[in-house]
Amino acid sequence: MKYLKEDYQSLFSKKFIEQRYNYHLIGGILLGVLFYYLTVEAYYTWQRLILTNLIVFMGAVGWELVRGLLYKYEMDWADVRFGVYGSLIGSVIGIFIS
């Protein structure tokens, strides 16, 4: 819960743009919509939501791990969280579109 509170506070601060969380949010939204339509094998809507957000989460963690291994960056879990927040928003948008 501590991280949710910090993330909410960073939405309305200068840190949101400085840390490029807006790009993670937008990328998550796009991937959420895309993977919502690619997970047609899941019959029920709640299954598609879980599968979509799990795929985006695993991709975000993988991306952060690769960046850490290749460029020696420290892993930033806030980037992963904002990507998943965007994925949640994108998959809900996918529900409303279909």
Image (cartoon, helix red, strand yellow):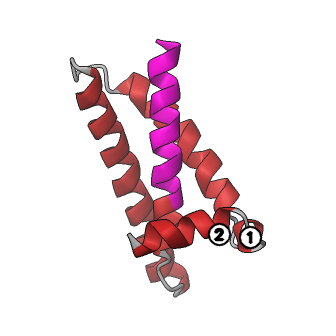
Q: Position of residue 7 (x, y in %)?
A: 55, 67
Q: What distance separates the C-alpha of mark 2 from that of mark 1?
A: 5 Å
**Residue 30 appears in which quarter of the rendering?**
top right
Image-based side of 94 in relation to 15, left or right: left
Q: Position of residue 28 (x, y in %)?
A: 54, 47
Q: Which residues are magenta?
A: 82-98
Q: Is residue 6 magenta?
A: no
Residue highlighted by disc 2: 10
Q: Residues within 10 Å of mark 1 (few under 14, many from 20)?
A: few
Image-based side of 32 in relation to 49, left or right: right
Q: Is residue 84 magenta?
A: yes
> As rendered, which of 34 and 8 lies closer to the eye?
8
Whether 7 is drawn above or below 46: the answer is below
Question: Which quarter shows the N terminus?
Answer: bottom left
Residue highlighted by disc 1: 13
Query: Which secondary structure, mark 1?
Result: loop
Q: Position of residue 61 (x, y in %)?
A: 39, 64
Image-based side of 58 in relation to 9, left or right: left
> As rendered, which of 83 and 66 lies closer to the eye?
83
Q: Among all residues in the image, which is located at the extreme top?
A: 98
Which residue lies at the image location 46% right of the left edge and 65% below the top edge?
4
Whether 74 is drawn above or below 46: the answer is below
Which residue lies at the image location 44% right of the left edge and 21% below the top edge?
95
Which residue lies at the image location 72% right of the left edge and 74% below the top edge?
15
Q: Residues within 10 Å of mark 2 (few under 14, many from 20)?
A: some
Q: Amino acid at mark 2?
A: Ser
Q: Residue 90 shows which numbered tag?
A: none
Which residue lies at the image location 52% right of the left edge and 87% below the top edge?
72
Q: Main secondary structure of the magenta part?
A: helix
Q: Position of residue 83 (x, y in %)?
A: 51, 54
Q: Amino acid at mark 1?
A: Ser
Query: Which secondary structure, mark 2?
Result: helix
